[in-house]
Amino acid sequence: MSARDAGAGGFSLVELLIAMAMMVAFGSVVMALIIAGQSMARMQPEAADLQQRARIALQTLGAELAVAGAGFDRGPLAGSLARHFPPVVPSSDGGITLWYIAGRAAQTTLVAPLVQGATDVFVESAGAFSSASTAIVLDSRGCRDVLRIDDVTSTLLQIRAGVRGCDYDAGAAIGQGEVRTYRVDPATRQLLRRDEATGTTVPILDNVAAMTIEYLDGGRRVRMTLRLTTAVSNPLVPSLEISIDVAPANLQVL
Amino acid sequence: MALLTSLFATALLMGLGLSILLLGSAETALAARDRESRALAYAARAGANIATADLRVLPSWAGVGAPGIVAEVSATAGQLVDSTLVPAAPWGGPRLDLRALTARLQAESDAVAPSGSAASWRLFSYGPMARLVPESGWQNPFYLVVWVADEGSNLVTRSVAYGPGDGRSITEASLVREPVTNGVRILTIRPGS
């Protein structure tokens, strides 16, 4: 009987052991690759989402900070709001409040005093104002208030009733603008934006663990740091910390 | 058996790899868009600064905002002035029509201003961004246009940076001439307005 004939009935124990060892080694390599691939596939959307939220935060807060302090273009109170009061201030709830006049067109002056409780604001020209918008009223003493405009006619702004800090004489400036507070709610871990004219709060970003605000160069530069986390805890994706360092142009042009 | 196992594993890994690749390419596209929009915003801001610098060195603003030989262009213009009012878009898109853009801006301005009080917008500076930063032309395929309007008490500049994919960013500024020093004061500025 030849050696070839002897092996025709099956494999020897050594051959089997070698084959099994090779299979185990090969299987281990394949399994390791699959596990690594799976964890990468799980991690990748989380990491992408984190980056995307960081971009939104940078864009939203960066744009708001850039325009903060924009003031009136004409009249005796023309110039940055910072000439009259601090338009970028810490809020009582740990956030940051930003004031600005939004555009050139919707700006005018009062032609009659605006007293406490009044809801009619008589102005020189209200044509460029829109209803359901926010306005800022400012006088030469630095008194300012944020108003909610409900309706507009040619020389009349109808505003929502509310407590105001001051009474305003004719000649005070009024312009369509925004007064917004950004803060992080630690309970819901959301970055929130509150419209100070209506008191309404809307979430801007989810999964924001913390926000710190630094006022640098005597308040002319603002650094906001946000710590973003993943929606589901994933040890492979660490939290992301981003900083927005803005020197609002209107705080530099005093 | 080994062949089947390896085929199955290869297919699985390919699927995973493909999904990661797709996600990666989407992420790259988003990042590129984000970079472009930021660059546009900076370009618009640069346009406003350049116009302010040009206005600062002018001894008088008498001709600024007044119609020039071509009615759409300010009689006194800035240093960045292109040779045509229908320039080629630096990003390879259709040509920009600065006359039409001026007319549109004027119409928008007239619509919100009290009757008869709208200022006239004129082109003050216009040219490709690459002329300002020549070595980065391929990175900044933007076109800058700065209009001015004389509102009587103040001068308004509106700087618009145009870019690929209908991208544009605006920075508006109000300026006044200081009566004593003849210097220029920026009253207020609205980046990204």
Image: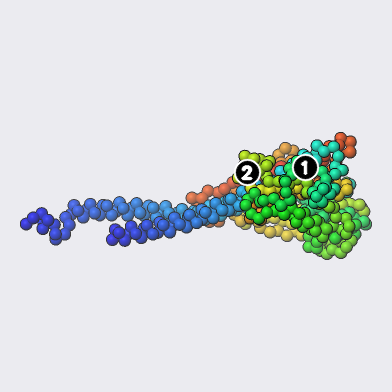
x and y, in percent, of residue B148 in the image: 80, 48
Which of these two is toward me, B130 or B30? B130
Q: Which mark is residue B140?
A: none
Callouts 1 and 2 on one subunit: yes
Identity, as a three-letter code, of the amino acid under mark 2:
Gly
Residue that mark 2 sits on: B137
**Residue A210 at least partly seen:** no
The quadrant where residue B42 appears: top right
Identity, as a three-letter code, of the amino acid under mark 1:
Gly
Say which residue appears at 66% left-offset and 40% top-offset: B133
Are discs 1 and 2 less than 8 Å apart at CB?
Answer: no
How is the structure coloured here? Answer: rainbow
x and y, in percent, of residue B81 in the image: 74, 44
Q: Tell me if B26 is positioned left or right of A134 in this view.
A: left
Q: Quadrant of the N terminus of chain A?
A: bottom left
Q: Chain of mark 2?
A: B
Nearer the N terminus, badge 1 or badge 2?
1
Say which residue appears at 80% left-offset and 58% top-offset: B107
Tag 1: Cα neighbours inside 10 Å, few (<14), some, or many (≥20)?
A: many
x and y, in percent, of residue A126 in the image: 86, 59
SS for callout 2: loop
Say which residue appears at 53% left-offset and 48% top-offset: A238
Q: Tell me if B130 is positioned left or right of A117 in this view.
A: left
**Residue A4 at least partly seen:** yes
Mark 1 vs mark 2, CA separation in Å? 21 Å
Q: Which mark is residue B78?
A: 1
SS for callout 1: loop
Q: Tell me if A129 is positioned left or right of B80 in this view.
A: right
